[in-house]
């Protein structure tokens, strides 16, 4: 298979210039969640400066965008897939930011090689911002990677540091605010960017598996999820209702891809 190419224009990057991404087979292509994270970076670029970390950097979209901001010195991408790390490094060169961006093969905050572990450890307490567009976790309520992002970030962020965290709206406001308790030291600040209501596209196997996981969480007494009915005004569906409707009609429920701002304020 040929390498796929995505061109993100100045509108997509909210003024940070065109980004050309190559994503070979087996690597990550930009998703709707990536694009709203990208918009958040461009729209709120004044919040980003100094040293940054891109958690789960994929093929480098968010790292490259942040590196375009003059006040940003360096961005270190942490990515578990070696193929994505190679593609991200090539994309950094392709987009003229290789001197400001580096990517490490890393399982969350645990780089694989000893040299990379030393490099990341050298950033303890020195990081001003962290970007993260995590997938749903495959266990629990699907929110575990967001908790992991914030709890691990405490080792690296300086006081006042910010996290641009992708959290789509179906998780619900209660889960978002509970992150303040699940990751002590962080304060929720605001919504940075959001799409309109768009299909939670259940033709994608990964999203269908997420919805099934959410339904199990609700069956076990967990917090409910919040989707919008695609064909009825102002009707919300929990995960079980959204799954039943999809199985009966083939219609995907609606959600909103969003990026939220957390700030590190240790006591």
Image (cartoon, rainbow, N blue to C red):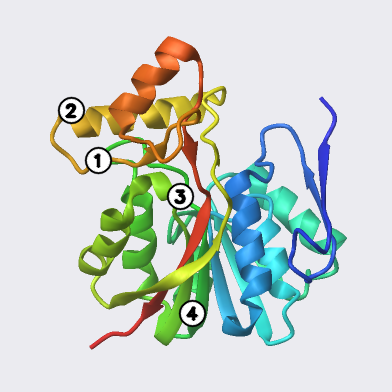
Residue 82 numbered tag: none
Of label 2 and label 4, which has the lower sequence position? 4
Position in image of residue 169 (x %, y %): 42, 49
Disc 3 vs disc 4: Cβ atoms closer than 8 Å?
Answer: no
Determine the secondary structure under disc 3. Answer: loop
What residue did someone put label 1 on?
Answer: 224
The residue tagged with tag 4: helix, strand or loop? loop
Q: Earlier in the sequence, mark 3 or mark 2?
A: 3
Q: Using the image, tell me which numbered label, if any, was put on residue 219.
A: 2
Instruction: Indicate the quadrant where residue 94 lies.
Output: bottom right
Q: Which mark is residue 168?
A: 3
Q: Earlier in the sequence, mark 3 or mark 4?
A: 4
Q: Nearer the viewer, mark 4 or mark 1?
A: 1
Q: Position of residue 243 (x, y in %)?
A: 37, 22
Alpha carbons under labels 1 and 2: distance apart: 9 Å
Percent across and percent down for residue 150 are 36, 66
Q: Quadrant of residue 227?
A: top left
Q: Which residue is found at the position 63% from the left and 43% from the top? A: 31
Residue 53 against residue 8 in the figure, above or below:
below
Label 3: how many residues lie within 10 Å, few (<14), some (14-19) or many (20+)? some
Which label sits in the foreground, 3 or 4? 3
Residue behind mark 4: 123
């Amino acid at each position: 298979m040929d390498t796929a190419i995505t061109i993100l224009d100045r509108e997509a990057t909210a003024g940070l210039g065109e980004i050309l991404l190559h994503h070979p087979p087996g690597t990550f292509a930009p998703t709707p969640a990536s694009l709203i994270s990208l918009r958040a970076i461009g729209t709120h670029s004044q919040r980003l400066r100094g040293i940054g970390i891109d958690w789960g950097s994929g093929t480098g979209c968010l790292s490259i965008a942040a590196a375009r901001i003059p006040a940003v010195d360096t961005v270190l991408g942490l990515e578990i897939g070696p193929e994505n790390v190679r593609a991200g490094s090539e994309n950094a060169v392709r987009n003229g930011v290789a001197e400001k961006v580096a990517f490490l093969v890393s399982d969350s905050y645990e780089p694989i090689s000893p040299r990379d572990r030393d490099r990341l450890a050298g950033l303890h307490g020195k990081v001003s911002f962290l970007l993260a567009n995590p997938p749903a976790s495959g266990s629990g309520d699907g929110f575990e990677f967001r908790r992991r992002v914030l709890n691990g970030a405490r080792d690296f962020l300086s006081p006042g540091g910010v996290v641009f965290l992708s959290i789509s709206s179906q998780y619900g406001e209660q889960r978002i605010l509970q992150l303040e308790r699940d990751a002590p030291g962080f304060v929720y600040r605001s919504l940075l960017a959001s799409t309109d209501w768009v299909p939670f596209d259940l033709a994608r196997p990964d999203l269908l598996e997420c919805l099934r996981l959410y339904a199990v969480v609700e069956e076990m007494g967990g917090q409910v999820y919040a989707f919008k009915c695609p064909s009825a005004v102002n009707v919300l569906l929990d995960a079980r209702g959204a799954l039943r409707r999809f199985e009966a009609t083939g219609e995907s429920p609606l959600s909103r891809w969003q990026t939220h701002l957390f700030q590190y304020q240790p006591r």
